[in-house]
Each structure stands twice: as structure tokens, then as C-alpha cells.
């Protein structure tokens, strides 16, 4: 009886890292940048809640989205270039 439980436990230990890798696929986890954005907007002497503060935060969001889009596009372009121009040893 003990050897059967031990085999199942060992099998679980071997499969767990593989299943954990499946959780990492897709979009990366979101990083909380609200404190950084808040500090940036406050450094411009803008009061939280004012129209200027809201505009500052929206601009930061747009800049971050544009940077992510550029990174994604560069990665796609690199992958396409590698597929279309394979190097053979």
C-alpha cells in the first residue's frame, strides 16, 4: 500500500512543474504601476483628482500601451524575419 502512494506522490511531483508552465502562457501578469504613475503626476505639482491629474494619468496609460504595442510588433517582425530567412549550418 505504501509503495502505491509513493508512486502517485512521485508522479505528482514530476507533473507539477509541467502544469505550472501552462499557467504562464498567454498574457503576462499585470504589474501595478499606479504608484509610479501617481508619483510622476504629483511631481508636476498636480493635485490628485484635478483635470490635469486625470489627463496626466491617461497620458501615462497611452504611453505604456504604445510601448507595449511597439514591443509586440518588434517581436512579431523578428519572428517573421526568422521564419522567412532561415540559416542553415
Image (cartoon, helix red, strand yellow):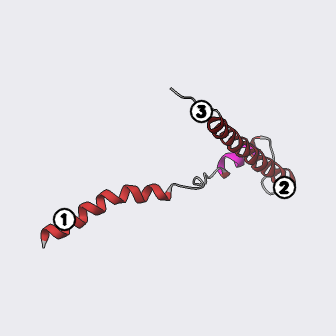
Return the residue found at the far top: 89
The residue that disc 1 covers is 6
Q: Label 2's element?
A: loop
The structure residue drawn at horizontal position 20% and vertical position 64%, both measured from the top left corner, is: 7
The structure residue drawn at horizontal position 58% and vertical position 52%, both measured from the top left corner, is: 28
The structure residue drawn at horizontal position 70% and vertical position 45%, both measured from the top left corner, is: 68
The residue that disc 2 covers is 50
The residue that disc 3 covers is 86
Q: Label 1's element?
A: helix
Q: Nearer the viewer, residue 58 or 29?
A: 29
- Please, is residue 12 above or below residue 83 in the view? below
Return the residue found at the far right: 51
The structure residue drawn at horizontal position 60% and vertical position 51%, both measured from the top left corner, is: 31
Image-quadrant location for residue 30: bottom right
Please provide the residue range marked out in magenta: 35-41
Main secondary structure found in the magenta portion: helix
- Please, is residue 81 above or below residue 34 in the view? above
Mark 3 touches mark 1? (CB < 8 Å): no
Q: Nearer the viewer, residue 24 or 82?
A: 82
Q: What x and y, as percent, mark residue 27?
A: 60, 55
- For the residues labelled 1 and 2, the Cα–Cα distance comes to 62 Å
Image-quadrant location for residue 1: bottom left
- For the residues labelled 3 and 1, the Cα–Cα distance comes to 47 Å
Amino acid at each position: 500500500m505504501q509503495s502505491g502512494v509513493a508512486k502517485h506522490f512521485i508522479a505528482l511531483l514530476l507533473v507539477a512543474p509541467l502544469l505550472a508552465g501552462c499557467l504562464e502562457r498567454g498574457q503576462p501578469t499585470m504589474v501595478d504601476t499606479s504608484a509610479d504613475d501617481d508619483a510622476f503626476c504629483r511631481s508636476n505639482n498636480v493635485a490628485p483628482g484635478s483635470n490635469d491629474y486625470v489627463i496626466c494619468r491617461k497620458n501615462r496609460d497611452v504611453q505604456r500601451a504604445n510601448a507595449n504595442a511597439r514591443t509586440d510588433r518588434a517581436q512579431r517582425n523578428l519572428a517573421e524575419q526568422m521564419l522567412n530567412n532561415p540559416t542553415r549550418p
